[in-house]
Image (cartoon, rainbow, N blue to C red):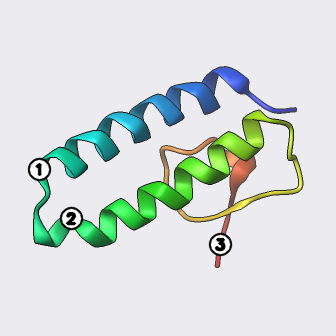
Amino acid sequence: MVDYAALRSRLWDVNIEYSALVKAKTEGSLARIAQLKAERKTLMALLAGDTTLRLVSANPMLPAAHRQSA
């Protein structure tokens, strides 16, 4: 079962961090921006009902049901 509240909450956090990094436009943030873009895409797909999609991440902020090791 998908915990939509947790997914929406995580998407909110990702969007806030992404926006801050884009506004700051620092050189070192490019890798993190790419990670956040990938995570946003995955979270949006999960919220849209794509239950076959899984994040390949050990990120503890993600709901456990959507994590798997690489």
Give the x, y percent position of residue 1. Answer: 87, 32
Disc 3 crowd rating (10 Å Cα; few below 14, some 14-19, many 20+) is: few
Residue bearing mark 2: 29
Q: Quick check: 41 above or below 9?
A: below
Q: CA distance from mark 3 to mark 1?
A: 31 Å
Give the x, y percent position of residue 54. Answer: 75, 59
Report the amino acid beneath label 1.
Ala
Mark toward the viewer: 3 or 2: 2
Residue at the spot x=87%, y=47% of the render?
A: 51
Q: How many marks?
A: 3
Could you tell me which secondary element the residue under label 2 belongs to? helix
Residue 48 lies in what quarter of the image? top right
Q: Quick check: 26 above or below 40?
A: below
Residue at the spot x=56%, y=45% of the render?
A: 62
Report the amino acid beneath label 2.
Ser
Q: Answer yes or no: do the residues labelled 1 and 2 have beta carbons within 8 Å?
A: yes
Closer-to-camera residue (56/28): 28
Residue bearing mark 1: 24
Lower sequence index among marks 3 and 2: 2
Q: Quick check: 67 above or below 14?
A: below
Q: CA distance from mark 1 to mark 2?
A: 9 Å
Relative to 7, 19 lies left or right? left
Residue bearing mark 3: 69
Residue 69 lies in what quarter of the image? bottom right
Mark toward the viewer: 3 or 1: 1
Q: CA distance from mark 3 to mark 2?
A: 24 Å
Give the x, y percent position of residue 67. Answer: 67, 57
Could you tell me which secondary element the residue under label 1 belongs to? helix
